[in-house]
Image (cartoon, rainbow, N blue to C red):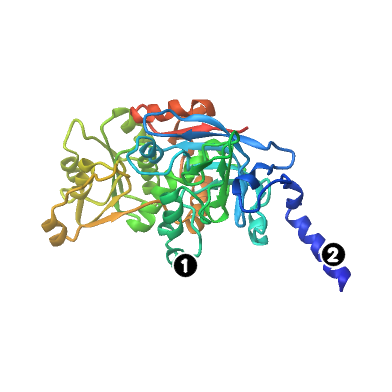
Amino acid sequence: MAMSASSSSHALLRRIGGALLRRSFSASASAGSDSAAAAGYHVAGGPSYMRGAVFWEPGRPLTLEEFQMPRPKAGELLIKTKACGVCHSDLHVMKGEIPFSSPCVVGHEITGEVVDHGTHTPIEIINRLPIGSHVVGAFIMPCGNCFYCVKGQEDLCESFFAYNRAKGTLYDGETRLFLRSNGKPVYMYSMGGLAEYCVVPANALAVLPHSLPYTESAILGCAVFTAYGALRHSAEMRAGDSVAVIGVGGVGSSCLQIAKAFGASEVIAVDVLDEKLQNARTLGATHTVNAAKEDAVERIKEITDGRGVDVAVEALGKALTFAQCTKSVRDGGKAVMIGLAATNVVGEVDITRLVRRQVKIIGSYGARARQDLPQIVKLAESGAFNLQNTISRKCKFEEANGAYEDLNQGKIIGRAVVEIME
């Protein structure tokens, strides 16, 4: 019996890839200090530190700082970040429009390679996501255990909002990021993906086929993830529905493609820049409307025989476009809001029309990582979603700050992606 138990133990160690041999801790590390524990951690054959882009305060540029190698805990994976998308949600934080703990590492739309598993990570996770796996990460990282996750509504995960969005930590209340120079903590916007390595809960990861490129696939975890959730769950879109998308930047342009993939009869792109509208045609838009040159609501109604669309999606987070969205839907139609707004921005709605005409106004934030992210990957793998045409700019890690500046000035037509590690 003793020999059988020993053999079983050795087999288990082999299955987890010798993870214990990859961890090294300094003798002086304090058991009660995450920073001290992280200080001695390194990946076998790899560095003991990394770089990350830190947001300090509004009006101050991101700076590249050196960090202790982030250490994953049980149920978490260390990812070597290959690419990270440049998203307006990060920009809202950087401009101080949405409160978030600082200093922090932004970036929440990543692809990468699994390089380690946290101690005591279940064998099922290790088997599903072995070392060397190519993965894509969802920005909503579900805990899997709260009231909403158990009901299948992972996009409302209590732990994600209570810990990550409210405190900038993972679900033990601790960040995984500590500066190399002084050990001070730095918070995480989602996984803090604008870094050479990041720690991600396994529930937020899906395998990325080798046929899909790292750089272009980064947008699957936020831009496409958000579009999929809006049309699949919030709008409950059906084949044959007419769809209008107001604001066709990174997320909005993804909505165009998802609507097309789901069989929309008409896909109407609305924006104020002709260049974005031209690009929208390549992504599935059947009609385009320049809201700076004509009344968007009236034009949408003209296209739909005076009724309005079955589903309208607002992807900017502005009071004006909120109103346009609600007015663009037919009686009984659905107005889905996915654009984040600055704090205290309020949208107005005609209450009597809302009641009499049964207009549905729905908020939608992301999607459901465990059930949706694998399906989104399949859409991309099948070619139903064109990744290449959605990405309008690629930049180096050192150029990330400039990419956010251009995003703020409206100079990025689709989505920009930062290429981080080779």
Q: Which mark is residue 7?
A: 2
Residue appearing at x 42%, y 60% in the figure = 158
| Residue 47 x %, y % | 69, 36
Visible in this render: residue 93? yes
Residue appearing at x 58%, y 39% in the figure = 183
Q: Which quadrant of the figure contains the C terminus?
A: top right
355 lies above or below 396: below
| Residue 52 x %, y % | 54, 35
Residue appearing at x 72%, y 44% in the figure = 26
243 lies above or below 148: above
Dot 2 amino acid type: Ser
Dot 1 amino acid type: Val
Visible in this render: residue 238? no
Q: Residues within 10 Å of mark 2 (few under 14, many from 20)?
A: few
Q: Is residue 289 left or right of residue 405?
A: left
Q: Which quadrant of the figure contains the N terminus?
A: bottom right
Identify the image quadrant of residue 237.
Answer: bottom left
- Precedes in sequence: disc 1 or disc 2: 2
In this rendered view, identify the residue nearer to me: 373 or 420.
420
Q: Secondary structure at mark 1?
A: helix
234 lies above or below 195: below
In this rendered view, identify the residue nearer to me: 389 or 99.
99
Cβ–Cβ below 8 Å for labels 1 and 2?
no
Q: Which mark is residue 419?
A: none
Q: Which mark is residue 150?
A: 1
| Residue 335 x %, y % | 25, 52
Point out the residue furthest to the bottom here: 1
Point out the residue furthest to the left here: 352
Q: Residues within 10 Å of mark 1 (few under 14, many from 20)?
A: few
Q: Secondary structure at mark 2?
A: helix
Q: Marks 1/2: CA distance?
A: 37 Å
